[in-house]
Image: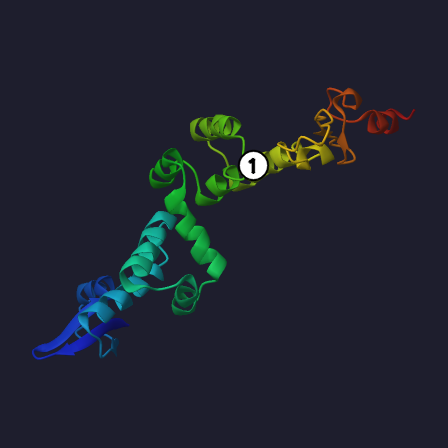
Amino acid sequence: PVSVVPIDSGWNMFAGYCRWLAHQWLGRDKILARVFDASPDEMQTLALIENLQRKDLDPLEEASGLRHMIEQEGSTPSQLSKSLGKSESWIRNRLAILHWPEHFIQALIEKFLAYGALEEFLKIEDIEYRDYLFKIACENGVTVAVARSWASTWQATHIPTPADNLPSTSPSVDHAPLIQRLVCWGCGEAQAPVDITYEPLCTKCISTVGGK
């Protein structure tokens, strides 16, 4: 149905205009409508909610609409969650897009990469390496699953060691040198680089594969 409010001369439609045009094109002179008793500000809010529930909006358009409702209407993520039938985490994840790096937002606008793939790249905290993968992905294309795999591999190879958690400014602590860890593709355990072969499997898994 379309959404309307009563006015002196009839009805003012504030949502569902495309559906109304489609009915006209089909030669129909009647359309199901929901009637609201709303002020102009309330009409704008209802229209935004209607638009945000459409299936053809991209994530950036959704984020912009949500920000408008928060800034102009004073809505909270919790209220938006109830109004839109979405989880609060979905609301917050969409709003986070507005704080993405500019080249990530541009890739989303130009549809170079999917929202899910960009979200996975942002899990990589090494900005230089992340942008290197981003460039490869834009040039060659990448699925969300592949982006998730890249992000997971980076996270797995950057397992914090006990020395990572020591306060760096404490004068009373003797810091042990940080030990780089790599993940064996066979057993999934973090190993010192000397125990990782070029396969990349640790020496224990190489022995098992080789039957030694």
Task: Please tell me which residue is depicted at 34% across the width and 57% down the height of the picture.
Answer: 66
Q: Toward the viewer: 186 or 158?
A: 158
In depth, the one of 7 and 158 nearer the eye is 158
Instruction: Rate crowding at label 1 as few (under 14), some (14 to 19) or many (20 or more) other CA atoms within 10 Å.
Output: some
Structure colour scheme: rainbow
Q: Residue at x 54, y 35 (%)?
A: 124
- The correct choice, above or below, for 116 with respect to 201 in the image is below
**The residue under label 1 is which amino acid type?**
Val
Residue 49 higher or lower than 56, as above or below: below
Residue 113 visible somewhere in the drawing:
yes
The front one of 156 and 140 is 156
Q: Residue 76 vs residue 132: left or right?
A: left
Where does residue 178 sit, x and y in percent of width and height? 70, 26
Q: Quadrant of residue 48?
A: bottom left
> Residue tagged by mark 1?
146
Residue at point 16%, 79% (across, down): 6
Q: Nearer the viewer, residue 149 or 90?
A: 90
| Residue 46 in picture, x, y percent from top left | 28, 68
- The answer to whether 155 appears left or right of 90 in the picture is right
Name the image quarter holding the C terminus: top right
